[in-house]
Amino acid sequence: MAEWSNWSGSLTFEPSSLLHPKSEDDIVDIVNKCRDENKTIRVAGSGHSSSALVQTKDVLISLKHFKGIKSIDKEAMTATLMAGMTVEESNAALEKMGYALFNTGDVDVQYLAGAISTGTHGSGRKLQNLSSMLMRVRVVNSQGDIVEYDHKEHPEEIKAFRVSLGSLGVITELTVKILPLFSLQRMDVFANIEDCFQYFDELADRYRNVDFYWYPRRDEVKIRILNDLETGISKLPFRHVVQSREEDVVGKVLPRTRELRFDETEFAFDAEVAWECFREVRKRVKEKHRRTVAWRTLFRTIAKDDSFLSPHYGRESVTISLHHNAGLPYREYFEDIEPIFNAYGGRPHWGKKHNLKRDMLKDLFPEWNVFHQMRKQVDPDEIFLNEYLRKLFNENKD
Amino acid sequence: MGAGRKLWAISGGFIPFHSNGNEPAFTSRDWISVLNTTSEEATLTLTIFYDDGDPIGDFEYKVSPRRVKKIRFNDLINPLPVPLEKAFGCIITSSCNVVVQFSRMDTGARANTIMGTIAYCE
């Protein structure tokens, strides 16, 4: 069996089987067989996550054959996409039909189903995470049945599916909100950290997508600003150096290709405490870590939502992400900063590295119990959990 | 032809850890200034050497015709960063003749210090 590796290379394992079903019937057969044989199933995406969400000694499924747009509902402004589409492929296919997703993350190589299921997000004070666009889901459940949940008929189930970490079944189709194809103007500028402290909130209120990278070896920032073409981006009220300025459709102007591989940890905070947390992180990195840490820290804003396991549940959020070159020891760095994140009530990004256990998680996520009651109903034998998720989810497995 | 050479070497690299003052202007650092007097774009390849491990690189940079470029060793990132407070050397190869000056600024003490020297060339 071939070894499976994630994007950064920090997670490698050998599943007993790596399967590439070509139809829902194939998936039904796999689920039934695994249930009968007491095996578990995880679904791999593009491998961009750096937590152990898909690590398994049992069956790993790739949905790489599930491609394409199944249908567009022009009235409801939704598109039904096959679950093997990446975010990039989704936007490219939608663009040809005159539509677009409302946002993407910093990269768009993830499977859309994986990005949605982990609460992945972009930037934008008024924009929710990518999970929020899920309106309907088609899934092969633990009994081998094909079922559909719609946000109108099954609002609670959709709140669970939106951030479900692959624990509720094998998603085969996603129906997501779409927008008429739109373009954005983008400007990336380098600026002084003190000017960023003073003006960032003003920029984030004014423009559609605003975030910044902090460079620990220079103690300066790169601010990324995107806005609609009609309003554009006005002259900035502080000293800065423009690195780039461009315009294009959202799926091309927003995400970037990353040649440098890195490991990542990210926590989401109530926006009210995020600056204080960031200042503490910056101080700690400068004092202790920049001898070896050179890659950047990312600060993003996200609107609150109501998905049960969303890191942005119920609070206007800011995320702070630490990046460290792949191949360098990341644990000492991430584990030294994590107590600062914990002290500010940070909720981990499910697809990135963290060390939180169930006892902390259940207090951080107000709907923790609601989600798990639902999960236990739809997957009583836990065939969609791996060892990593069992430890996170189950009371007696800590 | 242009001034300089195509192969340069630095043996005394050591980026200070501590800094004082506003950054990045006063970040303690090692850097090179590259002068390209030719009419062609220079492609530079930097390789970093240590006293206790394999070399890292290649770091690639472009210097436009008839221009100078400053490269901070602190900022090298892909494939790996150069650790601070660690001795290193550097080989710089260029696709055309260039002049390379090596400099260090240390703002960690009360009095800032700065030094510069022409790198070794062949």
Image (spheres, coloured by chain):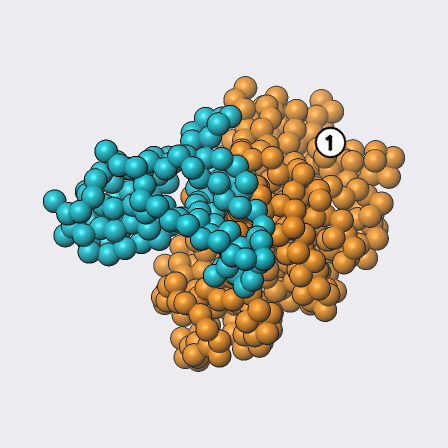
Q: Position of residue A149 (x, y in %)?
A: 67, 53
Q: Residue shown at 62%/38% (left/top)?
A: A330
- Is residue A89 in view from this perspective? no
Q: Position of residue A112 (x, y in %)?
A: 54, 50
**Is A3 on the left or on the right of A97, as rendered?**
right
Q: Residue shown at 51%/51% (left/top)?
A: B106
| Observer-nearest of B85 and B58 | B85
Count all numbered tags in the image, as a single digit: 1
Q: Position of residue A216 (x, y in %)?
A: 56, 53
**Quarter the C terminus of chain A occupies:** top right
Which residue is most to the right?
A396
| Observer-nearest of B84 and B62 | B84
**Is A265 on the left or on the right of A85, as rendered?**
right
From this view, report whether residue A113 is shown above or below residue A60: below
Q: Position of residue A385 (x, y in %)?
A: 72, 35
| Observer-nearest of A33 and B76 | B76
Q: Residue shown at 53%/42% (left/top)?
A: B84
- Of all chains in the rendering, the one displayed in cyan is B
Which residue is most to the left?
B1
**Is A394 on the left or on the right of A296, as rendered?**
right
Q: Chain of mark 1?
A: A
| Observer-nearest of B114 and A394 | B114
**Quarter the N terminus of chain A occupies:** top right
Q: Which residue is mark 1?
A: A387
Give the class, few, some or many, for how many residues have Cα within 10 Å of label 1's Cα (few <14, many ≥20): some
- Is residue A352 in view from this perspective? yes
- Of all chains in the rendering, the one displayed in orange is A
Q: Amino acid at mark 1?
A: Glu
Q: Residue shown at 58%/57% (left/top)?
A: B110
